[in-house]
Image (tube, rainbow, N blue to C red):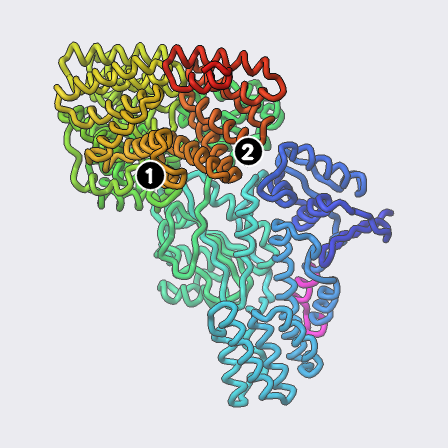
Amino acid sequence: MTTLRYRILGTLSVAIDERPVAITAGRDRTMLAMMLLRPRRIVGLGELTEAVWGASPPPTVRGQVQTCISRLRRLLPADAIITDPAGYGIDVAPGELDSERFLALVEAARSAPDAGAARSAYREALDLWRGPACAEIEAPGVRQAAAMLDERRATALEDAIDLELEAGRAREMLGELAAQVDRFPLRERLRGQLMLALFRSGRQADALAEFRRARDVLHDELGIEPGKELQDLHRDILVGAVPEVAVVTQAAPVREAPVHCLPRSVPDFTGRTGLVDRLLAETMATSRGPAIVVIDGMAGSGKTTLALHLAALTGDAYPDAHLFVDLQGHSEQDPVDPAAALLVLLRQLGLAADGIPPTLVDRIGLWRTELARRRALVIFDNAGSSAQVADLLPTAPGSVALVTSRRRLAGLDGVNPQSLPVLADDEALALLERIVGERVRADPEASAEVVRRCGGLPLAVRLAGARLAHRPRWRVADLVRRLGEAALPELAIENRTVGSAFALSFGQLSERTQRFFQLLGLYPGMSLDAPAAAALSGAHLDDARELLDELVDVHLIEEPEPGVYRLHDLLREFAAALAGQLPGPERQQALLGLFNLETYAAVASSFSTYQQSMGRELKHVPRLRPELVTAIADPVARIERQRPDLVAFVDAAARSEHPQYAWLIPRATWFQLFYRGYTQDVGVLHERGLAAARRADDETAVAMMVNGLASYHYRRGEYDTAREYVLISVRTAERQGDLRAMANKLGNLATLDIATSRFAEAVQTSRRAGRVSAVGRSRAVGLAALFQLSNAYQHLGNYREALRLDRIRLLSGGLRDTAQQHAGCLLNIQRSKRRLGLASAPAAQRYVEIALRLALREGIAVLEAEARTELGTILAEQGHFDAALVQHRRAVEIADRVGQAQYAAAHLHDYAVTLLRSGKGTEALAIFERSLRVARQARQPYSIARGLAGIGDCVADGDPDRARLLWAEARKMFEEMGTPERFAMAERLGDR
């Protein structure tokens, strides 16, 4: 008969019939170790992946795992590896695995009839060890699980040493003890045993010196003093009054029959591997006290299932009693008071009813006495509060308590509660597959949608899986259709429903908190903050923060980052149903408060000139409450965070009795979205706003939205569409006699003229915008018109006039708080000065660096790219080519990221020029050709001509005829546009 031996108590080794099995591949050894550390249990695919590849697995990870498993199958007996939808495991027979033999011998020692038999069993158990468990494998997952075995070895060693000292073998144990203390300098129990052995060997001074060393090590390494037991032993040694038995010990094992009162754990527990490993480590009781693990989470998150799973994994370490009590803190029944809970627990331990005292104080005392005699595991399920469970927790070393609750039990001193998240997508999918089977594998897309609709909530996934399992003819897609827009009604089996679980939590809230939660059901987006909650509910900001904290504590809302709150998808559906029960006027008033806040907060993120223009459009909108105004401390960061929810706000406003916010929110957010490069967001929001404005037949709102859409199409290089939209807004403003709006839109038209290389037209349009703004007495719009006029003059080569206009703008004081215009003005000034020979390269560089700092400070991606391109050009002029190319590449990356079709060709062209100047002609040619392609796609004649000229410069030495053709074509285009580059082309062609 074949004999198989697995050894993990030291380096990993396998032998079949005493012949070593050569497992040489590191990945194979890691996976085998992960399985042997948890024999006969499934190790999740995600856990195996993380153990081998860490946080960055390759795309082919599933296939590579299967390859490793196949190699192990060839080396091991055919039936050794267990395959499961969730992962893999290893089937180990009794006696095959040295770690199981070790644990059995330790248990035999603890239950031995006499000390001699116990010492013999401990020696045999400890002799199995050849070093730290899986010593050669460094994978964190292996080391974490192996550390638990190492801890059990250390505890067994300490128990064995206690027996040797009690047998009078203190002198013989000194060498072993000194070696172990050197290996584990922070284990106080070992240190105490060494002190005791030294004292009993007549070396009192050495024993006292050992205490001083212990105190120094603990202070230096952990910043703490030795524990009470070690200090008491030191005191006894000091006065020569040491008891016969060491005091730094674990709880003595009880000799009574074990008690097992746990409910059945689920056989298909799936996922949470990292969390399980962390909590398993916490369940290891220490000499300093019992292990207390508190698990909290929302209804249906699997708290009890996890606690029972942990109990099944770690129960062997607590052989005397496995106890369970449901405290009913979140149920339709009254909560179990501590006295009644203690009655249940003491009866589970076998105490007769007439032997249990009637008062709570006496029951607590008896309970703690009984636990002190045992190594026990106790599950306190469904705790309603810290007070309900505080007096029930074990106090003596040697036991572990697992507490579950829907509420964060912050009132338990010295305990760090673990909040249970929902399952990751792959874990939830694995759970669904274990329940349903092949149908999940046959339709992965529909299965993923079921998991998404369940939001990873284990109870929801189980109920969805149960519905499929009980209906063998259903496909997964059938369940997806039934879930539809409302999943809660479908997530029910008999009397188990997700909705009823949520309703229990909701029913335990105060009336004030219930109304607050209902109103949160109106929130259109995914994430909200305290100001949004206050605006929606009408509560004062401080009250809103308090209510949000209360909901977080009972897991009816999540706080994924400080000050940001989120409802689970199913809880959002639950809250929305509750909100629908509120009176219509109350719902509309709540939404009005929210839309008002989001509009004002968006305006606050913009520069003051933009705020002033929005002020005219918000004059009929209710003012924001003062405490909400001051609460928006960082409006720019807030709009960045709210950006994913803006479409939902606009859609909700369009459906509400306040449709004006469907166009005011896009208008208010335009500045930050446009200049930060969120072009697609600008387009989507303004399209929706335009639809709402047309339904409301509001001409002014339509003009507002088409103007925003013009900027979207401009950024995308769709200039004809952009021009059509701008002309609509110009005509509307002219018809309404709104001179300020008309001047502003004419300025936009001039910008389009420049983008399409109509520089002469841009001059005329900019001048007209300036005249209209002067009549309309709009200074800010007039300064903007000067900016467009200066740009047009620069392209036409009239640098002196461009410089004059930009100096007027800079000295006017109107740009002080407008970083975008201020920086643009500085860039224009240095360009004009360089063309006129009025500024050296270092001086121009200072202008550009100031502009770049402004762009970075305000997060304006468009301006940052422009400044970096200018900086690259100036650095190249000074011969700093490496630094110049860094700036050019960064500018091109930004333009690509934000979709700057109108500037992309220019950035590429200047990058190529610097490449050519640095002697990298081949690279320059490729970039010039790319610039030309982009320019042609965007239909920009000026950039097309520059691209042709640049390619001509690159090929001039090798193909002069082609170069002349390219220069001639570029010259013709420059002449048609009236730009000064026509002179450079004439010079290249020898035709001055």
Mark 2 residue crowding within 10 angstroms, few (<14) / some (14–19) / many (20+) = some
Q: Residue at x 51, y 54 (%)?
A: 323
Nearest to the observer: residue 630 or residue 15: 630
Magenta residues?
A: 104-117
> In screen coordinates, is 744 left or right of 949?
left
**Res. 381 visible in picture:** no
Name the spot of residue 977 as percent of width and height, x first. 38, 13
Picture layout, residue 336 above or below residue 84: below
Name the spot of residue 606 as percent of width and height, x first. 26, 33
Picture layout, residue 858 above or below residue 777: below
Disc 1: which residue: 854
Nearest to the observer: residue 918 or residue 135: 918
Q: Residue at x 21, y 39 (%)?
A: 628
Picture layout, residue 412 above or below residue 396: above
> In screen coordinates, is 485 left or right of 631?
right
Q: Secondary structure at mark 1?
A: helix
Nearest to the observer: residue 60 or residue 479: 60
Q: Secondary structure at mark 2?
A: loop
Identify residue type, mark 2.
Ser
> Whole-Å distance between the Cαs marked 2 and 1?
29 Å
Identify residue type, mark 1.
Leu
**Res. 263 visible in picture:** yes
Q: Residue at x 28, y 22 (%)?
A: 788
Disc 2: which residue: 918
- Frontmost of labels 2 and 1 is 2
> In screen coordinates, is 152 left or right of 868?
right
Nearest to the observer: residue 962 or residue 331: 962
Tell me which label, 2 or 1, sits earlier in the chain.
1
**Is label 2 in contact with label 1 (beta carbons under 8 Å)?**
no
